[in-house]
Amino acid sequence: MLEILTSDQMRAAERFTIESGGDSFALMRRAGEAVALKILDYFSPSDEPGRALVLCGPGNNGGDGFVAAALLAERGWSVRVACLVPLHSLSGNASRAAALWEGDVEPFESVIPDPDDLIVDAVFGSGFSRTLPPVVSALFEKVESLDMPVVAVDISSGVSGDTGAADPASMIADLTVTFFRKKAGHLLTPGLAYSQHTIVCDIGIPDDVLEEAGCAALENDPALWDRAFPVPTVFDNKYTRGHAVIFGGQRMTGAAVLAAHGAYRVGAGICTIVGPPSAADVYRSLLPNALFEAREWAVPFDEHLRDSRRRAVLIGPGAGLDDPENLRQAVRSACSHRDRVCVIDADAMSVFAENPEALFRLLHANCILTPHEGEFARIFPDVTGDKRSRALAAAARSGAVVLLKGADTVIAAPDGRCVINAVVCPGLATAGSGDVLAGMILGLVVQNIPPFDAACAAAWIHARVGGLFGPGLMATDIPDLIPRVLADLM
């Protein structure tokens, strides 16, 4: 269940199900029942009846809420229901669902939340993309001020299922119960932050409708790339495992060192840092298991890549912008070997900010760009929209794989493939974390993993390491935890 849908694709999946003989009201009943059952699982572990305030909206999401309320009451819970609109104004399946509720229905304006209640947010679903009405915002603010537990039906009301954009008044859900597949808004920020945990429930929509409905992206998971992942064998040596080259800078030497550690930890056989002669002692002392080659600007960087065993190159971490023309020339040299993978990060992108097209003309299918949002804006200043759309547009324009970093890292390929790696791990927002990630990608492609798969795998491993360490993470901690994640993978 790795497919991620837009709101339109979810509606199409429901429509195809109904056209194939499904019952739309049956889908609603299964959705509401799934919400109630998950609430019972998560919030009634001792089988003691609880208390719930179910907030229903005017559409199908509200209908799911009425079904859930009826089932919770049937199981002995003390349940209150409030509806945004008068019941007589409901229509279709929402009206049928409301008829299942036999208790009173309060208007939003008069609701007084009880701190002992569990809030069920069934006001608006993933198709909502407007500003929350004032009466809803006011009620949500009351709930938030009381720090009450919240369960969201489909998605937190006010969060766009397509982009993750969120109304500031949207409530953060302790649990979100969605249906058939996750929506893009569950994984893209800021929507990602509006649910502590998201569960996908089966409501009777067959998987084969995806052939017609399509999907917007895939959620990153080893199932997407584990067949290509390298497993060491007794026949390996350091050259069969790959020789990687890293362009090292003069002042920010730590960046290249972190990248080399990342490359080694994911399995690269050898790393050579090509740096200025004046930094040789620094690199050799910080990374004794790497080779160092002095770089003279009079000698093209290309000379360091002629050995066919040097399968991939990383340029950018700590490169510096003191000598922009020579850095641009190094990027040209790195990209000129079209049979080698070239990972372009940090300064190696920013140095083309005044003329991004000059960079794009160098790129090819074996190139990977790894920008954060600031670097992305410099080289794709006119690419707008949600993060998924921007990453796809950037990959199509540049002809390279684009890994757009963040809590919701998006990996996009020129052929339209798109993967979202969404992990809430604030500890990874630390200096040098991206350098390690770039090195991990390098260490995987040098072992002959295709560029897109390597970017996805590195992002997944990087995020898992952040989760393992917890608070206090520094970039230097990341490489040492990679083996623990690899051991689980293998």
Image: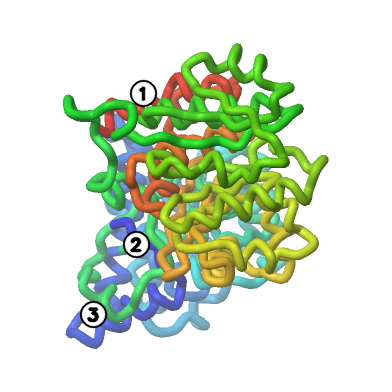
Q: Residue at x 76, y 27 (%)?
A: 251
Which is more toward the observer, 85 or 256?
256
Q: Residue at x 23, y 47 (%)?
A: 227
Residue kind at label 1, given as amino acid type: Pro
Residue receiving disc 3 = 23
Q: Quadrant of residue 259?
A: top right
**Mark-to-mark CA distance, 2 and 3:** 23 Å
The quadrant of the rendering that contains the N terminus is bottom left
Which is more toward the observer, 255 or 49?
255
Q: Nearer the viewer, mark 1 or mark 2?
A: 1
Q: Position of residue 223 (x, y in %)?
A: 27, 49
For marks 2 and 3 on the same chain, the one whose residue lies earlier in the sequence? 2
Residue kind at label 2, given as amino acid type: Glu
Residue receiving disc 2 = 3
Residue at the extreme front:
298
Which is more toward the observer, 416 or 427?
416
Q: Residue at x 70, y 29 (%)?
A: 276
**What secondary structure is found at the residue carrying circle 1?**
helix
Is residue 11 among what the camera can see? yes
> Is 360 left, or right, of 448 in this rendering?
right
**What secondary structure is found at the residue carrying circle 2?**
strand
Which is more toward the observer, 345 or 47?
345
Q: Nearer the viewer, mark 3 or mark 1?
A: 1
Q: Position of residue 425 (x, y in %)?
A: 54, 35
Residue receiving disc 1 = 483
Q: Position of residue 29 (x, y in %)?
A: 29, 67
